[in-house]
Amino acid sequence: MTLNLEPNLSDPDGFYEALLKAHEGLSDKESRELNARLVLVLANQIGDPATLAAAIEEAK
Amino acid sequence: MTLRDRYPVALRLYPYRRSEDQGAATPARHPVVIAGGGPTGLASALDLGRKGHRVVVLDDHEGVGLGSRAICFSKRTLEIAHRLGPGPGMLEEGVIWQKGRVFRDRDEIYSFDLLPEEGHRYPAFINLSQVRFEKFLFEAIEHARAEGAEIEIRGGNRVDAIEAGRDVIRIEVMTPEGAYNLEADWLIACDGARSPLRNMLGLGFKGRVFEDNFLIADVRMTADFPTERWFWFEPWFRSGDSALLHKQPDDIWRIDFQIGWDIDRDKELKEENILARVDAMLGEGVEYELVWSSIYTFQCRRMERFRHGRVLFAGDSAHQVSPYGARGANSGVQDAENLAWKLDLVLRGLAPETLLDSYDAERIQAADENILNSTRSTDFLTPKSEVSRTFRDAVLTLAARHSFARPLVNSGRLSVPCTYNALPGFGPDMLGQPARSRPGAPAPDAPVNDGYLLDLLGGEFTLLGLGIEVPKATKVDGISVAGRALNDMSIGDMLRERYLGKASSAAYLIRPDQHVAARWRELDLDGVQASVRNAVGKGDE
């Protein structure tokens, strides 16, 4: 599996809204923790080590 | 209370004139009274007047308000204006655009094309000042009057009180010569965002106010920027947190700056301070003239219901959105079009009054779609927390590098007409595809022979036969259904793709507002009859 950097979200605005909604009312610390958990959940979905490594590089 | 202008009038199109109703022994009764002479009110009056109804428009001002306000008029609005007459003139005068570019600082991070396909009479958008747009509608009303339409616009007539009864609405009107009363069977409230009628009826307004101010300036200059919508996040010229540049006719450019929540409004509105921001944006030595400016905040909200008995709210009085999507005036004109044919059938006794509940349901669905899109854009433009700013900045950073992040960049999602979804009054869909022309959708335009498909539709119900013969004119319970048949020779590739897809023939029932009501693979006249009855609120009978 290679890292997909082309548009892949079927509803980008809906996803973005849901993401912000999840953070509503949280403190900065709680938000950081939510983001950390979310990254780990999504990483598990990807699974493939090479893809994850490429994603980490791209995000830097 | 005497009459006083709430805003300066740019064009005194309908100066106050005493009407026969003033001083009448008993209040005159009118079938339709429209409060407000903005885009929604004028479009409603024109549509209903052309359908043969007597219409009175009451406007507390004597013409069009100063300032451009709305500038982007959408394809759907132009298609409606085409049916009503002034579409071609608007197109000729307006600035056509369909491309937008989004910058962060100095770098372009994203661009879009709103109408990447051919075969439509009208472009995705034109820019035209609201003053001109309203003047076009007014001229069309004058033209219709010359041909016998009974539309009367009463300038300097302010609605001061109403009594909304079960069978009649009593209206107290103030004029420069004092008050008078009149009665209406139906009242369309197009009296704007601050709607006095809404307040008179004690009706609420739910939604969100966004904590940001926008400075809007129209400047006149000769510049060779392309006719595209240019939007900057965190612009290099630092005139605001974001900025927008957009061309209008006659070398007028619309500029918007996002200037934050805690501002001194009077100070920001001082000409020298506005000029300083514009100078920073345009650079040294660019000559321009400030034509109009204003500071606004915005709300995303709507009334819980748009129909209150015999009072129907339309346009800004019923719903408001942030401006970054061209969803204000455009949705008002679409409200007007949705309501006009329904009220027409009710007034002629051909449909039950409950048909007007479908106006409520359909335009609330449209308003919710507009509010959703506009709220999302605003949340992106004006991050309301640290974490949402962090995400926003991450999107902008990634968008400069990778295409995947670009669809997340939200500088305004521009208005497309609502496809009414899962509401009563539509169906059946016996064709199953193409998705874009399914029941509930606005009929997509396509070239036909030397013209366009939409020229063949609208005004009344239309049965469109594609590769099928259909009766030229039929009636269902007194309601006219025009037949239009196109044979294989007339069906071009675009029409085929948009209406037939994999099928070789189809029959479409199209409502008077050019929304698809139902469709079939074969001609089914019993089905057509049932669908017309269903579309006019008689589905359960």
Image: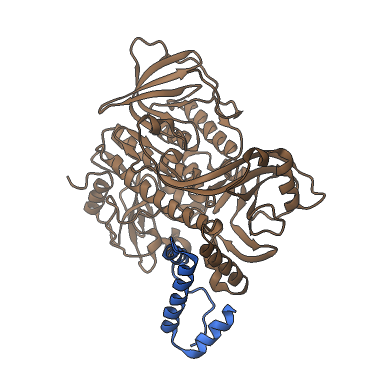
Chain colours: A blue, B brown
Q: Residue furthest left?
A: B541
Image location of residue B20, percent across then percent down: 42, 14
B470 to B160, vertically: above or below: below
Q: Position of residue A3 (x, y in %)?
A: 52, 83
| B541 displayed left or right of B146 | left
Q: Quadrant of residue B356?
A: top left
Query: In the depicted view, which residue is nearer to us: B232 or B456?
Result: B232
Q: Nearer the viewer, residue B54 or B326?
A: B326
Q: Is residue B289 above or below residue B429?
A: above
Task: Examine the image and state in which quarter residue B459 appears.
Answer: top left
Residue B489 against residue B248 in the figure, above or below: below
Q: Position of residue B317 (x, y in %)?
A: 43, 38
Q: Position of residue B538 (x, y in %)?
A: 22, 44
Residue at point 65% right, 37% down? B266
Residue B122: tell me if it is visible.
yes
The number of callouts visible is 0
| Of residues B95 and B112, the one drawn nearer to the viewer in this rendering | B112
